[in-house]
């Protein structure tokens, strides 16, 4: 064990496929899962003389994301050629942005007190997809031959680069989830990691706590789930600390995370060297978004997930608020709370009950606060999903809350289950649920659970 306390330092490069109808620089339609090489044209296949035309919608989407991250929007963004040689890149360069990205510095506040600087957000085109076939590993190493599907080539890709402001796998996970949620809610990308429409490269280094400089980073690639990203970060942190403890020095390098072995393997780079010889794209003029367009997009932004989590966290804590927002249930919880339902109960109802028409929020709130039978409650929620409901018919189905009626039922159940009673009295209060269930069965779901719980506790104590 070393005495040094190590601090992880993490920065992310996130790519999202934009949900435009057509590709970034041509009119080929985007179609996931379409037959191989059915969405191509002279532009995205790089036939000589074919010229790119930028996709207006992709530019608008990128600006919207930039505004959501509080970024400066460039008045004169420049497309650049990033040169490298690989079969997935027919032009021999990728059109990207380098010195003048569309969106400059900004920040994303992750609820819980972590502010992550956004270095830049820019627009580029995705490469085609290579499929390595015949080999035992399925990777390029050992494959017999490779096939290229150019359908993906030219897909608009939003790249978001964060500052190295994250200091744990947990925080990186929360940042990435919030960023994803923001992207999805803006409607600019489906951002599904399993489908490859969201990808993240993760840069990781460690340093002794208190040190302010940065040490060489490892860039982790090809992790296609939130879980693998988290585990990849943990593996890199672990291995770097072990290396420093052995007295080694580290170099900047690129790894893949192998989920089967929970280890990092050296990434086979497809580029010769990290020298892309960027230069301005001569076939495209600079992008100069009109100020009134930017202002219109800014004022059209919805309330963002981060802000909603902050707002709900005051009542529910960050974790529960994040869960509500990330599952799209926060509006329901707020509607219940607005009509008097206590916040925790409102959150539980929003998470556990199905969707209902917003106009039914008030009636449902009245019903859940009254002592109605469980059946009435189920019926009310079922009906509230498809049409307007009135509270009164449900309120009439009052639950059995009368102690003189419930008392004997409970006494009989306790008498019939001496073993469970002893377990409860021995400290295992979890068996309370067993008794509640038994009372509900005995009363055909008509007993008021609140009264049942109170009576059970009293009698079991006794
Ligand atoms: P490149 O474009 O060559 O990958 P950048 O300077 O743009 O290099 O950095 C890429 C990412 O690496 C950014 O997300 C940044 O936050 C992160 N990063 C930079 N230095 C470090 C470091 N020492 N430790 C961890 N992450 C780092
Ligand atoms: Mg990089
Ligand atoms: Zn095309």
Image (cartoon, rainbow, N blue to C red):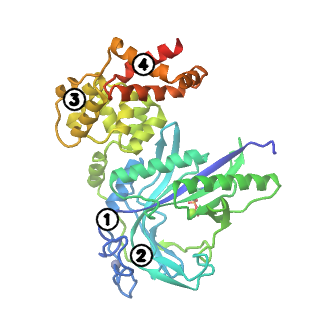
Please report whichever mark, 2 or 4, sits nearer to the chain's N-terminal start: 2
Residue position for label 1: 20
Above or below — where is 121 with respect to 33? above
In front: label 3 or label 4: 4
Q: Tag 4, which secondary structure?
A: helix
Per the image, label 2 sits on a secondary structure element best described as loop
Q: Give the side of residue 357 with respect to residue 110, left or right.
A: left
Q: x%, y% of residue 153?
A: 41, 75
Q: Which quadrant of the render holds ligand 2?
A: bottom right
Q: Is residue 106 visible?
A: no
Which residue in the structure is indicated by mark 3? 363
Q: CA distance from mark 3 to mark 2?
A: 52 Å
In the displayed structure image, the side of residue 279 where residue 357 appears, left or right = left
The image's mark for residue 410 is 4
Q: Compute the Cα span from label 1 to label 3.
A: 40 Å
Q: In whole angstroms, how far apart are the C-alphas of marks 2 and 4?
A: 68 Å
Q: Mark 2 CB in 8 Å range of ligand 3?
A: yes
Helix, strand or loop at label 3? It is: helix
Q: Is residue 208 above or below residue 310?
A: below
Q: Secondary structure at mark 1?
A: loop
Q: Position of residue 65 (x, y in %)?
A: 38, 53
Dividing the picture into quadrants, the one containing residue 60 is bottom left
- First along the sequence among labels 1 and 2: 1
Give the number of the disc on residue 153. 2
Instruction: Give the residue drawn at x 55%, y 73%.
Output: 276
Asked if the residues shown at circle 1 and circle 3 are in contact, with their CB atoms under 8 angstroms apart, the answer is: no
* CA separation in Å, label 3 and label 4: 32 Å
Q: Earlier in the sequence, mark 1 or mark 3?
A: 1
Residue 435 in the image: state x and y as whole percent. 46, 26
Of the pair 346 and 325, the residue shown nearer to us: 346
Establish whether ligand 1 lies closer than 8 Å to the Cβ of label 3: no
């Amino acid at each position: 064990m070393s005495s040094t306390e190590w601090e992880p330092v993490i920065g992310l490069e996130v790519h999202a496929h934009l949900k435009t109808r057509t590709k970034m620089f041509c009119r080929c339609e985007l179609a996931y899962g379409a037959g191989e090489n059915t969405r191509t044209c002279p532009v995205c296949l790089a036939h000589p003389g074919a010229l790119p035309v930028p996709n207006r919608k992709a530019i608008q989407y990128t600006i919207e994301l930039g505004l959501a991250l509080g970024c400066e929007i460039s008045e004169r963004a420049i497309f650049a050629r990033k040169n490298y040689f690989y079969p997935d890149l027919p032009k021999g360069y990728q059109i990207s942005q380098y010195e003048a990205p569309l969106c400059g510095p900004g920040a994303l506040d992750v609820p819980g007190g972590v502010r992550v600087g956004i270095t830049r957000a820019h627009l580029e085109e995705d490469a085609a997809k290579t499929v390595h076939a015949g080999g035992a590993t399925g990777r390029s190493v050992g494959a017999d031959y490779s096939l290229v599907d150019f359908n993906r080539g030219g897909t608009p890709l939003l790249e978001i680069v964060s500052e190295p402001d994250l200091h744990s796998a947990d925080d990186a996970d929360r940042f990435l989830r919030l960023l994803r949620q923001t992207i999805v809610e803006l409607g600019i990308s489906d951002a599904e990691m399993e489908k490859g429409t969201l990808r993240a490269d993760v840069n990781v280094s460690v340093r002794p706590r208190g040190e302010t400089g940065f040490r060489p980073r490892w860039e982790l690639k090809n992790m296609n789930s939130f879980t693998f990203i988290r585990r990849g970060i943990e593996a890199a942190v672990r291995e770097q600390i072990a290396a420093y403890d052995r007295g080694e020095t580290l170099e900047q390098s690129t790894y893949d995370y192998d989920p089967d072995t929970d280890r990092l393997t050296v990434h086979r780079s497809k580029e010769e060297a990290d020298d892309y010889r960027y230069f301005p794209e001569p076939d495209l003029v600079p992008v100069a978004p009109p100020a009134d367009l930017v202002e219109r997009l800014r004022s059209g932004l919805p309330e963002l997930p981060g802000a909603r989590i902050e707002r709900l966290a005051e009542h529910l804590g960050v974790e529960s608020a994040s869960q509500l927002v990330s599952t799209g249930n926060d509006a329901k919880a707020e509607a219940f709370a607005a009509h008097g339902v206590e916040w925790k109960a409102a959150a539980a109802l929003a998470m556990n009950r199905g969707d209902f028409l917003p106009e039914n929020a008030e009636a449902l709130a009245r019903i859940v606060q009254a002592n109605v039978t469980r059946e009435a409650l189920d019926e009310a929620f079922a009906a509230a999903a498809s049409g307007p409901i009135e509270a009164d018919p449900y309120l009439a189905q009052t639950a059995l809350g009368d102690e003189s009626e419930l008392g004997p039922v409970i006494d009989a159940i306790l008498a019939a289950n001496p073993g469970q009673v002893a377990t409860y009295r021995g400290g295992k209060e979890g068996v309370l649920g067993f008794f509640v269930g038994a009372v509900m069965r005995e009363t055909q779901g008509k007993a008021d659970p609140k009264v049942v719980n109170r009576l059970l506790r009293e009698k079991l104590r006794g």
